[in-house]
Amino acid sequence: MIRTLSGYKPRNGACPTRQTARFVRFVSVAGGPVRLACALLLFMLLGLLWGQETVWVCPMDPDVRSNQAGVCPRCGMKLTSGIPERVEYHMDLATTPRAIKPNQPVRLEFFVHDPWKDRPVMSFQIVHEKLFHLFVVSQDLEFFVHDHPIFEPDGSFRYEMEFPKPGMYRVLGDFYPDGATPQLIAKTLFVGGGNSATPVLPRDYGSKKAQNLQVEFRTEPAQAIVGMKTQLHFHLTPADGIEKLLGAWGHMLVASDDLVEMIHTHPFIADGGPDIQFNVTFPNVGTYRVWVQFQRNGVVNTAHFDVPVSELK
């Protein structure tokens, strides 16, 4: 006899399929090989269901899922069995001095608060070997910084820098509050002494000479289409000495020419060789500057390319 916890009893040798059954107990096997085979099949199905109850997901790339604990093969982050609902946290940015001038030292201080009671966040997860990834981009797209502020005992992050020219700058914070989801929040700063115009960017797929790498670039499709996945392919030479940079085979920042849209991402396909692929879905029509960073023999290489994005025709 096969009996389930719900009290269901199969009739005429039929195989029990009630979905509410959570436990099956063999008392005896009567009725020959048909019932035995049916019971074994049921055990296999229940085992499969039980094994799939826990799904491990990458907080940075939620499309990466596994039925086993481990790390994300794409970005290297630890997979988690439960991701909270995505809610944007508050990030405040203070500068000292408040009036910023070109080529003068400035202290940037970042304060993160939860979105429910505006309480200071004191605990953060490490993402790519750092607690906070900072990007600073000038309005003319000629100035680019990717660095990592210092974590202070009060939960704030501090960074010292100089802005090279007047105009508007976008400051992007990438961090992961403990118990939440990864955050990507942009702020705007103005440096006195003049204004910078939004640049007009022609298509630029030309090979770039970086610090100790030559970086070649192409996209698939050749013309990027808004709202559709675009593959960004990079070929590095020389091919020897390529290393992970902050736990990933590459880092990318994508910014629209008006600095409204900004995307921080990592390779979709990379194995330590000279060919690296990123995937990006461009959200609007326009031209985007793409900065990429790779490491070779301990040296960080930075190169940029300009990608026009059009409507599907």
Image: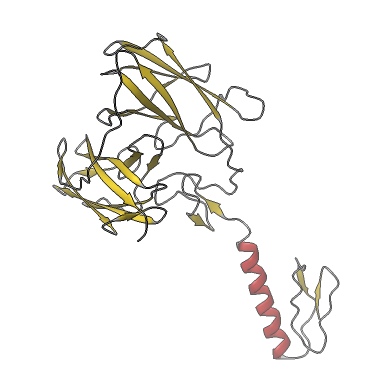
Residue 285 percent coordinates (x, y)? 37, 47
Q: Which quadrant would the C terminus be assigned to in this image? A: bottom left
Residue 269: percent from left, percent from top: 33, 54
What colouring does the structure picture have?
Answer: secondary structure
Q: Is residue 269 visible?
A: no
In the figure, is residue 130 to the left or right of 8?
left
**Residue under the point 36% across and 45% down:** 266
Left or right, 313 with reference to 236: right
Identity of the residue drawn at 45% across and 44% down:
77
Between 45 and 191, the residue placed more toward the observer is 191
Q: Nearer the viewer, residue 108 or 49?
A: 108
Is the residue 85 above or below the residue 6 in the image? above
Instruction: Say if 279 sits above or below 179 in the image.
Output: below
- Asked whether, in this view, residue 112 is left or right of residue 237, the answer is right
**Residue 93, can we see it?**
yes
Decide: is 215 above or below 185. below
x, y percent for residue 30: 78, 87
User: Residue 55 is drawn in which quadrant?
Assistant: bottom right
Quarter of the rendering occupied by the N terminus: bottom right
* Residue at (69% x, 76% y) in the render: 42
